[in-house]
Image: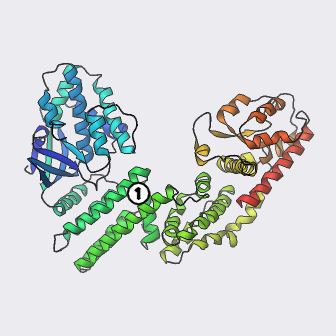
Amino acid sequence: MQNGTMKLKDLFNGDRIFNIPKYQRAYAWKDDDNLEPFLDDLIHQRGEKSYFLGTFLFHQKDTRGEYEIIDVVDGQQRLTTIIIFIKVIIQLLTTQNSKKISKKTFSRYIYDGENYKLEQENEDSGFLHNYIFENKKLLNYETTSQRRLIEAKTFFEKHLSKLDINEQEHIFDILVNSDVIVYIVDKISDATQIFELLNDRGRKLTKLEGVKSFLMYRIGCLKLKDNGEQSTNLIQDSFASIYREVEKFNINENDVLRYHTIAFERSKSDDYNSADKFIKDKINLLFEKETDDNKIKNEILNYTKRLGNSFKIFAEIKNNNIKCSKYNDLLMIGRVNPFYPLMLKVYAQEQEEFSNFIETLVRFTFRASIISLRSNGETDFYKWIRNDEFISSDINIPIDNNWWNLNKRVEEVLEYKDFYNWVSKNITKYILFSYENYLRKIKGYPLLTKENYFSNDNKEKLNLEHITAQRVKNIKFDDDFKENYLHSLGNLVIDTTSSNSRKNNKNVNEKMGEFIKAPIMSQNEINEDKIDWENIDEIKIFIDKRNNKIIKFIKSEIL
């Protein structure tokens, strides 16, 4: 294969197998962002001029018998999409007996009886062959990228089937006769340099992709005995592991790149939101200072190793591998992202203290959330990390030293009569959810889980319900009740959406029947006191009593 411009159909000659290397991200194209523009461009192509499909960068890696194995260094998302598109349109044209295609067409682009023309060095390769190319019946998929592959195939089937055979044949002609620019090298170090230059000229990468290409490019600039091949392979291995974690656990890669930079790279506050620029500037400075090439190599490889370890730790934290019971509480409260750098640091260096750290962090974030505190204290925490002074017990400091008058303000909020309108709905839900599990634990019932808390299923989704609804039959609320009792914490309970809808604005006695049957322990508890639910004074006494009980629970179990 020669560098330069060629037709797409000439790219697919009979003796080439395109391989997506392990260090590349898995398939990620989406309908709206990628597939629709791809198809629209082909449909609306007009005139005699050939359609330009883009640039591909290849590494001529190896041979397999008579076949060339070509690694796709740049353009793997587009190439995968092209082959899925061709598979779908071949299938549609075959069913209509089109003379544009034949068995040879399928052999050229998809499978020639011995080898598939596209392979992937990850767990998606067999999935691609079986369910995209061979149309085997799909039972389920295991990764987000596998879902994306199926969605791409379904997208093209749906939209291409709306076109008549002439339109389908026309689009097929445009695609296979489109122009592509090909760069092919026989050394991966050369490929990474070209890749970096190409992507410095306006092509958008994620920050993590930019870091990967930059590090591989900079290794290729060094004068090393093996031209950087071994070092480049180590970088590829590290990023292959990173992308496996990203795919398996649906990790936001740019977030973790930022968390890592804060936690482990002695970065300044100005670097927190530009973690990619931070490492590029750091490595470029070594070049400017004419640092020894081996020292630069070691700095690059050590950084790559540290970054890979951070992704592994983040995946373990997100998956709660350490079985920390309070981690899920942190997710439910919602103030979690600012603290991931701290969690990475503690998990890496004081893992035996991680559960205690999370427990204290929950106490702090609950306080901060219930009073709607804007600060999370991260400015100080990150400064201590930067100076290598942070340890897990430091998370106690905001509570112990009463930062922002934190503790007194929490006490004041707990006294709010109009709790429902002043405290965030999520924190109110968290309090009542925690109270529910407190009752379940006492009575030996299975606890509700994080999945229950975040469920969007109408039968299971948890909402807030007023025990005495805002408008009920048979009771006339006086001004005192409206001001001091209606929205009291003691008049609130969690309920599922379906159950809440069923109760709606029934009178209180009718509601009590529903509460007795409810699978929510805190609802069942309401009926334990014998209350005349048409006597406003008795209802006030009940709400005060229940409010005090929940506040006592908060102080003893959450604060």
Give the quadrant of the C terminus: bottom right
Q: Quadrant of residue 15?
A: top left
On the image, the x and y values in percent for residue 414 come to 77, 55
Residue 188: where, in percent of width, then height? 18, 60
Residue 406: quadrant of the picture: bottom right
Viewer-proximal residue among 96 and 261 = 96
Is 545 displayed left or right of 273 in the figure? right
Q: Compared with residue 314, is residue 10 higher up or lower down, i.e. above or below?
A: above
- The residue under the point 76% across, 32% down is 514
Q: Amino acid at mark 1?
A: Asn
Query: Residue 298 appears at what percent x and percent y?
Result: 29, 75
Up/down of 117 relative to 241, above or below: above
Q: For this rendering, which residue is in front, 43 or 466?
A: 466
Front in this rendered view, residue 445 or 527: 445
Tell me if residue 226 comes above or below residue 441 in the rendering: below
In the image: residue 231, left or right of residue 491: left
Whether residue 486 is visible here, answered yes or no, is no
